[in-house]
Amino acid sequence: MRSVYVVAGGISKFAKARPDKTFPAIVKESYELLLEDLGIEPRQAYELIDGTVASYFSDHFLRQLKGATMVQDYLGLCPKPSHRVEGGGATGGLSFQEGWKSIASGNMDVCLVFGFETMSHVNTWKGNEFIALASDVSFDYPVGGFYTGYYAMMVVRHMQEFGTTPEQLAHVSVKNHANAFYNPYAQKREKLSIKDVRNSPMVAWPLTRRDVCVMSDGAACVLLASEAGLKKIEKVSGKSLPKVKVTGIGRGTDAMRMADRPHKKVILLPHEKESDYKDLKYPGVHSFRAGRMASKQAYEMAKITNPLKEIDFIELHDAYTSSEIQTYEDMGLCKYGEGGNFAESGATFMPAVDYGLKLKQKPVCPVNPSGGLIACGHPVGATGLMQGVFALWQLQNSIKKHFKDDTLQVKNAKRGIIHSHAGTGTYVTVSVLEREG
Amino acid sequence: METKKIKKSKTETNGKMSMNGIRTSQEKTVISETDEGTVLFNVPFPKELDERRLKDLENYGPIIIKQPYHINYIHSYGQDSPFFAGLANKKLLGTECEECHTKFATPRLSCTECGSKCKWIEMPQKGKIHTFTICYFGSEAFLKETPFALALIEFPGFDTCFLTRIVGVDPNEPDLDWVGMNVKAKFVRNSKFSPTDVYFVPEL
């Protein structure tokens, strides 16, 4: 397989609603930022781009089938090849990897992956109904289909099994909102206290409004290229571009119904032993087997043996504070069961941000330096690509340029991870990005 | 309100067609308009088409397109149908893999663990709360039922759980101690052929 580089990224402003633009125009906003960053014109980009991957989740929100075609023509990229990818919350992560495949296989030299979602077109509760259709409509949806309810049940089991507390969950919310305070693209930029999080309206016990991501309108795109593609882009733009390579990809799956997850042995990562988990019933509903599988594959490919030490930052799919904590464990940042303590330890916080919290330890591996889904917003098809854009900017050391503030720049970031997650953990992707040289 | 009968479009009845199928009379080539659908508020428009004023137009507000999304789906539970017939007869059915003997408390006729066929077995009607939540908000379809208790129930000898509602707990006082609570199945009298035909209550 050929090497694949992430060359450039663009993002639109994420907001509760973007009535100022239609979805193709919101994607174009992100694409224009990408082109501006490269210093090339749309006409030149057309010559360079071999094809695209379109990332969006829901035809229900859009009330428009074949929406990707409207974006393709709006960007002026017809008749270049394209296809649409859909995989629930992991749509963006899957699309990123489909773009990777197009390059790695030799099918394309330059591939644009664009993603979007416009969720403001229905009210929040109707939106929740649409999202809940991504659960079994015969057995799950009719009983009270509501994703926050599903995730609440998972974390209740996590609390029961491991002693995790709602205050530990709140630490994730405080961290991600405070990080987003310095990210101009984020939807919710707030400094909160643990109390603020716990005193927010309860959505599904124990998750409050501040534990849950919001619905958003927004778009993001990344440009991927082979070695040869990168050279072509450099020639046209007249710039020498930082080399950020995709060194690992992994994916996993689990049963659609979270009731259908029997107890098995833990899938071990290189730094773990079977004896670590002698009495653990796994995965049940407290852990994401798909996240573990995706991590294992990506780590093997990128030769990561001790994730916490060898990863500089992670953009992690924190649709819920609880799922960030569950994912710490799946990704092997801490052992299964230790996620709650790990969340409040300070290990995943940013060194330069004042959180108003007394943290036990210094940051080791910042998680969601951008603010994550909870604070940036979660326009589903754009989300996994938003992570790609922010990770790229971290590795290019260009956060200051893009955010007009370098508080969120992870110093000397060499290796970052983007993690995308669907359903109740039904599809998960992990992609490893590394700066060369 | 008076209901108007929409006149049958003139073009359909009276329009004259030329040989190649193109209507010859411009006057009659109009679509018949109806009064349902789009509601617009305060649509501004500049007297002159200057760039700035046209730019301002991009900022007007959302419009509401009324499109009631009510669809009668023709649904079949297919191979899972016996489960729903069971509920209508106060029976809880699960399945068991004929090869690896994994027992599923939510029935499935193909085993997640080995891909083999499963057979129907009758389930116990008593179990324990494996995990739960109280939903104070929900999807639009369920908002009127909030707050409600959702739970996964575990059954002795079964490898998977069953998603259901719990009735008879105080939704305003959720407690982690509810995990492990003994519960029993109750069935609605008038089956709706839905998984909500069964719910669980604390077994005191």
Image: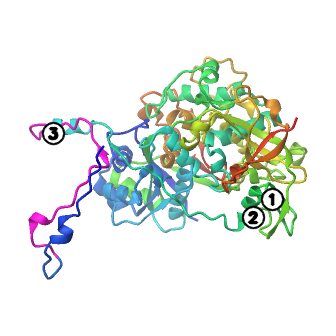
**Tags 3 and 2 in contact by the CB under 8 Å rule?**
no
Q: Is residue B84 left or right of residue A276?
A: left
Task: Judge whether residue A271 can be spotted in this image.
Answer: no
Same chain assignment for discs 3 and 2:
yes
Query: Distance of mark 2 from mark 1, alpha carbons?
Result: 8 Å
**Tags 2 and 1 in contact by the CB under 8 Å rule?**
yes
Secondary structure at badge 1 equals: strand
| Disc 3 crowd, CA 10 A, few/some/many (<14, 14-19, 20+) | few
Vertical side of B198 occupied by A349: above or below: above
Q: Say which chain tag 1 marks.
A: B
Label number found at residue A341: none
* Quadrant position of residue A346: top right
Dot 1 corresponds to which residue?
Answer: B93
Closer-to-camera residue (A237/A129): A129
Vertical side of B14 occupied by A126: above or below: above
Dot 3 corresponds to which residue?
Answer: B51
| Disc 2 crowd, CA 10 A, few/some/many (<14, 14-19, 20+) | some
Task: Judge whether residue A18 can be spotted in this image.
Answer: yes
**The magenta segment:** B22-50
Q: Amino acid at mark 1?
A: Leu
- Give coordinates of residue B8: x percent, y percent: 23, 63
